[in-house]
Image (cartoon, grey):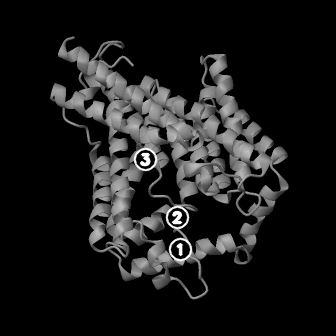
Amino acid sequence: MVPGEQGQRRDVWAFYSLTAFAAVMYAVPGEWIPALAPLRLALMTSVVAAGLMLIRRLGRGEPLYLDGARGWALIGFSSLAVLSVSWAVNAEVARYTGIELLKLTAIYLTLVNVITSGKRLVVVCGAMVLASVVTSIGVINWYMVGEDLVEGFRARWVGVYADPNHMAMNLVLVVPLAVAFVARKGSAWVWRIACLVAAVLAVVAIVLSHSRGGFIGLSVAMGLWAFREKRRIQAIVVGSLFVVGLVVFAPDSFWARNETVAAFHEDASAMGRVYAWQVASRMSLDKPLLGVGAGSFRYAWAEYAPPEATRAYVAHNIFLDVIGELGWVGLAFFLVFAGGASGGAFAASTSRTMGWMARALSAAVAGYLVCDLFSGYILSAHCYVLFGLAAAAHRIARAEEAKETQGVPEGRSSAAPVGAWEGSGHAA
């Protein structure tokens, strides 16, 4: 085998491993199949993908693409988290959080280096949609049998989905992706039905979570997708069907919990968010530049909370969490990263060949960030995968635009100015 063919094969296997990671992220087989737990499939598939990508780059003498300002901002953000060990309220937690953020940064960089074509982008998104069926069924099954319901009525599942709010926001991001596949003209009818089933099950699971932030995020995501989709009439019809289904089939407890927003002073969960936001504000006033240290929000709670807030909560807002733990410096890094990835998805929406997927990704990003205004999970792999997909869509769209500008006939490879990988002739 010649060196070029060997590098090509490694690149393809890196893509397969990355796709497997995206599926495992939702199916989490190690959480409900005891025999698979020791394998740590998410870690294994992500390490294999990153390792093969690096070996290929080193073997061909190609530089690692760091994705410009947003990539460097993420590297700065995770590096700041590691450095915060020296001033954190809880150094051990800060060390763990910093290391985990470095892992998530590696996943993001693997995504933007491996997903180099519209076909690859669609395959990874499709894998997430299909795997989300496992999560949704798990949530629905637990609700039906009454297993481990939070507050006696809020559904959840295993692993990262044990928190109803976290579960809901992770399912919110797959709904616009699934609906985009359903509305895509020319897709195989079997695949469209599978995506429709995935979307319906995800919406049901979100409803059963009784997550108010999840409901708002889902509404924003679907509304934005329907508004921006080029075949707007069809998009509005599809979106309306989901709304009608939600209104008809949602249990009374779902609407009852959402109505408590108007009387949040009487709702312990809502007041927990208010207290958390007050704590974040006081942390920022006390340590504005660097915060209390990565992961240390709850450990610094007692020092900053009002007397009536006797229970320590998470920040319940990702931006306030960042500013509380890593200060304005950390927030600047995070905003450049998140804003760059989000803006990239919107910019890619005009792409001739993959704009339909970019519009779904931009809707998913918007819905996810709305959920994060009420939740806030810095260490969520779903967040960095979603932003990685958005950034990859942007770079693919730019490469496509560059080829059209240069007048390169479709089907022929050409070296694009945004990175050496663009002209490498990936077939998968």
Residue 147 lies left or right of residue 120; in this view the side is: right
**One can see residue 332 in this view:** no
Percent position (x, y) of residue 314?
53, 68
Q: CA distance from mark 1 to mark 3?
A: 24 Å
State the residue lying farthest toward the bottom. 307
Residue at 40 percent across and 30 percent down: it is 17
**Which comes before the other along the chain, label 2 or label 3?**
2
Tally of numbered tags = 3
**Which comes before the other along the chain, label 1 or label 3?**
1
Percent position (x, y) of residue 363?
55, 43
Q: Nearer the viewer, residue 393 or 137?
A: 137
Residue at 43 percent across and 38 percent down: it is 389
Percent position (x, y) of residue 23?
51, 34
To which residue does mark 3 refer? 384
The type of residue carrying mark 1 is Trp
Residue 210 lies left or right of residue 57; in this view the side is: right
To which residue does mark 2 refer? 317
Q: Secondary structure at mark 3?
A: helix
**Which comes before the other along the chain, label 1 or label 2?**
1
To which residue does mark 1 refer? 277
Residue 300 lies left or right of residue 6; in this view the side is: right
The type of residue carrying mark 3 is Tyr
Q: CA distance from mark 2 to mark 3?
A: 16 Å
Quadrant where the image shows the N terminus: top left
